[in-house]
Amino acid sequence: MFENRVKRLLAGSQSAWGASLPDSSEIIAKVTADTGVDFLWIDLEHRSFEVDAVRWIPIICRRKGCACMIRVAGLDAQLIKKALDAGANCVMVPQVNTADEAKRAVEYAKYPPEGSRGVSPYWTLQMDVSWDQYLPVANEEICVVVQVETPQGIRNLDSIASVPGVDVVFAGPTDLSASMGHIGQLNHPEVQQFLADFPTRVAAHGKAAGITFADPDACRRAHQQGYRFIVFGSVLSYGTRGLVSDLASMRSLG
């Protein structure tokens, strides 16, 4: 029950493939988890809802053996604690700029003595799990993902990746393009070169590199470059593409 699928895959030098949740819908979360993806990404940084709107979704994921990653709005102990207490077993912290900030992300996600997370995991009640079962393995279960996407983060990539307790260093392509002076130009040569070098630099410190693209071909290229934690779309994006394709086919009937 407490095995984090993402951590198991990465420890075995395998890849973890995830899908994003476009809304706070429990139904969308359920059908996404049913596809067999390794993890579901819930974004609380750029969405209008907070953790209370998605409080049952980590439970849905746990019941399916799908890891649940919540991206919190920033490096904040309270936001990280709430995400994990709701049942997420992966937490993503955006705009991590320094090794010190990466250390704090780990600290906030772990119970003492490895960290400073307060003890009151609420999700265990919904799954009839005792604290005696969960607490001894909680620190090992949690996957900490730090996102590099700012000019300062770019300069400090190697020191960030060297921080113990960080499991994944995640490249944010869109924000990186902006930070490099090429906002919205993901195909700019400078951006592409940085992204191509990113996995090797991160792997040198024993960490997995993560990234997200809506385009499956871009995700395949990222995998070839060495990324092993990849978000490749959502049921909404795939469903829309399928509907558009089939609609064109139907209309061709006259």
Image (cartoon, rainbow, N blue to C red):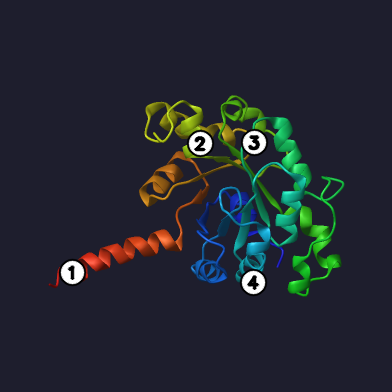
Determine whether the residue tagged by mark 4 lies in a helix, strand or loop: helix
Look at label 4 and name its amino acid: Arg
Which residue position is annotated with label 3? 96
Q: Is residue 75 left or right of residue 114?
A: left
Label 1 – label 4 distance at C-alpha: 41 Å
Q: Does residue 141 appear in this view? A: no
Reading the image, the residue beneath label 4 is 63
Three-letter amino acid code at the position of disc 2: Asp
Residue at horizontal 82 percent and vertical 67 percent from the top: 133
Q: Quadrant of the C terminus?
A: bottom left
Q: Residue at x 65, y 49 (%)?
A: 72
Amino acid tagged 1: Arg
Q: Nearer the viewer, mark 2 or mark 4?
A: 2
Percent position of residue 95, x then y: 61, 37
The mark nearer the N terminus, 1 or 4, is: 4
**Pointer 2 local density, CA inside 10 Å: few below 14, some 14–19, many at least 20:** some
Residue annotated with mark 1: 251
Residue 15 image point, x, y percent? 53, 51
Q: Residues within 10 Å of mark 4 (few under 14, many from 20)?
A: some
